Amino acid sequence: MEGINQFLNFTGFANATPGHLIMITIGLVFIYLAIKKDYEPLLLVPIGFGILIGNVPFIENVGLQIGIYESGSVMNYLYYGVLKGIYPPLIFLGIGAMTDFSALLSNPKLMLLGAAAQVGIFATFIGALALGFTQPQAAAIGIIGGADGPTAIFLASKLAPELIGPIAIAAYSYMALVPVIQPPIMKLLTTKSERKIRMKPSRSVSHLEKILFPIIGFLLTTFISPGALPLLGMLFFGNLLKESGVTKRLGDTAKNSLIDIVTILLGVSVGASTQATIFLTPQSIMIFILGALSFAVATAGGVMFAKFMNLFLSKDNLINPLIGAAGVSAVPDSARVVQTIGLKDDPTNYLLMHAMAPNVAGVIGSAVAAGILMSFLMHLL
């Protein structure tokens, strides 16, 4: 009987708490949204199952070495790539190898929309300070507004490693919910006539421009924001692999096998970090609320800045304000949302390629913003 009692005491049934059950339910919801609603399945399936892994109840600190926060456990080693910011630059390498910057190069002024959307980051930074977070923590929370999961994880690993779990989950959750969150804001801030604005076709971009852009873009952005060097270095390197024409194998590896492997490891380990005994805190709830506000402000900032730019443009060169919403760096989902909303008002108005310009600019903008915040705040740690 003693052996049976010991066995029962070690089971998950004996150690389950309401918190574990809440987190398991959240993990199941993530998996449901990924499979049934097709919301970012490549992210939500690994994260959702990771939440299940992290919330199987067990007795802690008895030498089992199975929890993600237990030194020496397998999950702890996988989580090391999150804590030390190893995974995000590798994700950026794959993104760079997948990204075509032609839309941005053909109409450089749309880069301003990617910059304008970063207003959500700095607005949320101020809001987080008002709620009592430290400056480094507030900066890590604010970056959620960029809708860039890898950048959020990278900055949190440097400024607020104790908040990586809720920040990462919030960032990826809002990335997945782009088709739900953005459309109401876009429609509220634009008129039907504005949504029907037709933009001029993009000009053809030469091969030389495509090769020079990652080199010049890397040097320019990292000289401005050296803190973003790991992210932007890998982003532009990946893009050079794609555009050079002589490294097809490396580019294919970066955008396929490598990014898939890292996405699996990142998603599962981030999900597992939501262990209920550590994750469910008032701080986590505030981070989710601030993250939603940050994302909404970023979307609104991009749309309103597009309308502001139209005040200075001729009638033939007007910008459809919808594409400003793509300034957040949820590539390519924000651009697809712009296309979907635009087609509802004019079934022949194709905005996808125009929206890709601020969308990829947003990736660069959020990384630059993260680097700037690091340079200002690292001395406080």
Image (cartoon, helix red, strand yellow):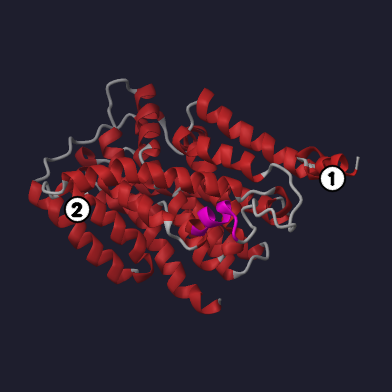
Circle nearer the viewer, 1 or 2: 1
Residue 249 located left or right of residue 34: left
Residue at x 46%, y 59% (from the top left corner): 154
The answer to whether any part of residue 99 appears in the image is no
Question: Looking at numbered disc 2 in the image, what kind of residue is underneath it?
Answer: Leu
Q: Position of residue 347 (x, y in %)?
A: 31, 20
User: What's the residue type where badge 1 is placed?
Assistant: Gln
The residue wearing badge 2 is 240
Specify whether residue 253 is in view. yes
Most common SS among magenta residues: helix
Rendered view: 216 above or below 242? below
Residue 335 falls inside the magenta stretch: no
Residue stretch in magenta: 72-80
Farthest bottom residue? 379
* Quarter of the image where one finds residue 340: top left
Q: Earlier in the sequence, mark 1 or mark 2?
A: 1
Residue 143 position within the rendered picture, expressed as x and y whole percent measured from the top left: 49, 57
- Looking at the image, is 217 positioned above or below residue 184? below
Taking the image as shown, residue 73 lies to the left or right of residue 25, namely left
User: In percent of the image, x 22 and y 46: which residue is there?
Assistant: 251
Quadrant, the C terminus: bottom right
Which image quarter is the N terminus in? Answer: top right
Under circle 1, the secondary element is helix
Identify the residue at horizontal 65%, vertical 64% (top origin). Answer: 130
73 drawn magenta: yes
Residue matched to label 1: 6
Residue 202: name its quadrant: top left
User: Disc 1 and disc 2: Cα gap in Å?
Assistant: 59 Å
Q: Residues within 10 Å of mark 1 (few under 14, many from 20)?
A: few
Q: Nearer the viewer, residue 141 or 320?
A: 141
Count of marks placed on residues:
2
